[in-house]
Amino acid sequence: MSRPVHGGNLTWAAELAQCLPNELLDFSASISPLGPPPSVLEAIQAAFSSIAAYPDPAYGLLREAIARYHHLPIDYILPGNGAAELLTYAARDLASLQRPTLKLSPGFSDYDRALRSFDVQPLNIPLLEIDDLNTDRWRFEQWDASLAVPKGIPLDECGFLLNNPHNPTGAVFARKKVRSLLSKFALVVVDEAFMDFLPPQQDQSAIEAVYDFPNLIVIRSLTKFYSMPGVRLGYAIAYPPTLSRWRQWRDPWSVNTFAAAAGIAALQDNSFQRQTWKWLESARAQLYRGLASLRGLTPLSSYVNFLLVACDVSTTALQEQLLKRYQIYIRDCMSFAELGDRYFRVAIKTEKENQKLLVALAEVLPELRPG
C-alpha cells in the first residue's frame, strides 16, 4: 500500500503497525479528541427517521444555522460535502481568470489537486528559508505576494489561495493582512478550516469582509473542530452571485441528511465550543514544552490544534518505529515538498495521550541517530 498523502489513513497505518485501526493512537489527523459532542450524536440519531426522504435541496435549516452563527444573510452561505468539494468549485473560478493563481508554500496538498483539475499551474510563495534545521525562518509577516508574479502580469488579474490558519505550520495571518489582498487580486479564496480553534478574542476570520469585497470566498469546515470527518461537511461564504453559479455546477443533494443535522447541532453547542478552547490552551502548551525538551526536535508555535516539528532524524523512519512499537501514528510531511523527511506534524490530543507520544519519542529518537 502506497504512502498516504493525507493524515488519518488508519488502514495504511494499521497494516504497518500490525494492529486493528481502532487500536492506533492517531496523531496524524488534526481532529479534536473531545468530540463528536453528544449533541451531534443525538442529532444524527434523530435524523434516522428522515432517511426515507430526500434532503431539502436548498438546505434551508442548515444555512439558517450557519447564518445565525456568523450573523450573515442566508444567501451568503452554501453548504458542501466537506471543504474539499467547495475548494474544487473555487479552483474552477480561479481557472476562469486565465492568469496565475498564487498560494503559499508549503501548503495543503488538496489545493494542487483542485487546481490541477482545471489545468491551473499555481505560483508558490515560499514561507520557509532553510539554512539548517536549527535556524529556520518562517516569514509570515514579511512575505510579499507581488514578488511571485512574473513581470508583465497584472496583479489585479491574478487569483490568490490562502490557508488561514496555515496548514502545516499552525500560524495565523492577521485579518488586516488578509484584507489587504482583496484590493490587489481579482479573486481571493481563504480556507479557514481551522479558524474555529481560535477563541473569539483571537479570531482573525475574513468573513466580515464579504459585504465589501465580491471577490472574496471563505471556505470553512465543521469536521476538525467537532471531530466528525466521516460526516463530510463544510460551507462557503461569498457574494450571492458566486454561490448561485456554484449551485449550477454541483451534484444535487451533495450534503446528506445526517451531515445537515449534525451541522445544525454543532453550531448551536456553545458549551462544547468553550470546552474545546479551554482544553486546547493547556494541552497545546504541554505538548509544545514536551517536544521542545527532546533533543533534536524543534516545534513551531501554533495557534491551532496541531504542531509542526523540525526533526534531526528521518521522520519516515520515526513514523515507522512509532507505529510498529507503540501503535502511535504521526503525520510525516513528505507530501509537503518543501519540508520532506525532516519534519513531522502532530495533532494535539488529551494530556494523557500527549504524554504517551512524548515517552515514545524519547525512547525511539536516540536509536535512530547514527553512532
Image (cartoon, rainbow, N blue to C red):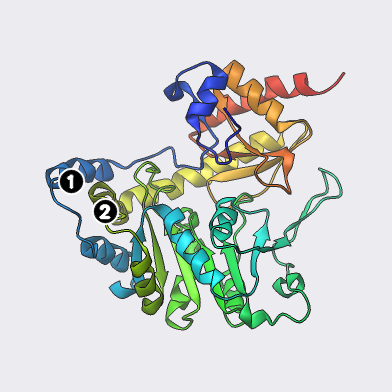
Q: Nearer the viewer, residue 181 or 83?
A: 83
Q: Residue placed at 64% from the left, 24% from the top? A: 320
Marker count (numbered): 2
Q: Amino acid at mark 1?
A: Ala
Q: Tell me residue 141's x, y (percent).
A: 70, 66
Task: Return the mark for residue 260.
Answer: 2
Q: Residue placed at 62% from the left, 23% from the top? A: 322
Residue 172 in view, yes or no: yes
Query: Is there CB contact under 8 Å for labels 2 and 1?
Result: yes
SS for callout 2: helix
Q: Is residue 201 above or below residue 82?
A: below
Q: Is residue 249 left or right of residue 282?
A: left
Dot 1 corresponds to which residue?
47
Q: Is residue 33 left or right of residue 264?
A: right
Q: Residue placed at 69% from the left, 24% from the top? A: 362
Q: Looking at the image, is mark 2 or mark 1 earlier in the sequence?
A: 1
Q: Residue placed at 51% from the left, 42% from the top? A: 30
Residue 200 in view, yes or no: no
Q: Quadrant of residue 48?
A: top left
